[in-house]
Amino acid sequence: MPLTAENIGQPDAVKAPGQDAVQAAAGGSPIRVLAIDDNEEFRNLITELLQPFGFEVHAVASPVKALEKFTQEKDAFQLVLLDYYMPQLDGAKTFEWLKKLNPNVKVIIVSGAEELRLRQILAQHPIDGYIRKPFRVQEALQIIRHVMSKSSRPSVAS
């Protein structure tokens, strides 16, 4: 079964890469993800990992450029995967801007920071969850599914 906005919380909704499923939101279009990370290898990796599961990933290096793109298409993105430590603008300020532009967008911090620091960040900001680098693909997908199904508490993977 393809992973869609309707079944994203169901455990059997994820299909393995190579199967002919395209993840679709309610309107029939893929769930759009804005990935913001200054590390090019990570941007390429997250795109390669999520696209086979039907996500439409737009990866941007600069938080400033990402906010410009988000400003133009703020209602088109359902999810933002955000590195916390970046030059120009840190994850906290980027998160604040994202939520000002679209309070409904889901934001997951994806960072190599220590577990304790990530929990402190969650306590300071109403972020939807975090994924600690390095991570397993299935764990990351589980967190994404949980966040996209509108959880009331932050989700974590380490």
Image (tube, rainbow, N blue to C red):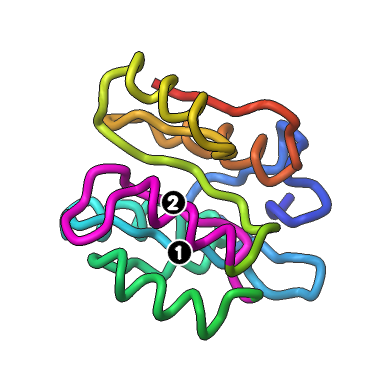
Q: Nearer the viewer, residue 15 or 157?
A: 157
Q: Mark 2 points at which residue?
A: 81
Against 69, residue 12 (above or below) is above
Q: Which of 123 and 83 is in front in this view?
A: 123
Q: Position of residue 125 (x, y in %)?
A: 52, 36
* Label 1, residues with CA under 10 Å away: few <14, some 14-19, many ≥20: many
Residue 119 appears left or right of 21: left
- Mark number for residue 53? none
- Mark number for residue 34? 1
Name the residue type under label 2: Leu
Name the residue type under label 1: Leu
Q: How many marks?
A: 2
Q: Distance between the residues labelled 1 and 2?
A: 6 Å
Residue depicted at x 52% and y 85%: 72
Q: What range is drawn magenta here? A: 76-100
Element under disc 1: strand
Against 54, residue 66 (above or below) is below
Residue 124 visible? The answer is: yes
Specify which label sits upstream in the sequence, 1 or 2: 1
Q: Residue most toward the bottom?
A: 72
Residue 150 appears left or right of 123: right
Q: Position of residue 118 (x, y in %)?
A: 38, 25
Residue 115 appears left or right of 38: right
Residue depicted at x 51% and y 79%: 71
Q: Are marks 1 and 2 in contact (CB under 8 Å)?
A: yes
Q: Which of 10 and 132 is in front in this view?
A: 132
* Label 2, residues with CA under 10 Å away: few <14, some 14-19, many ≥20: many
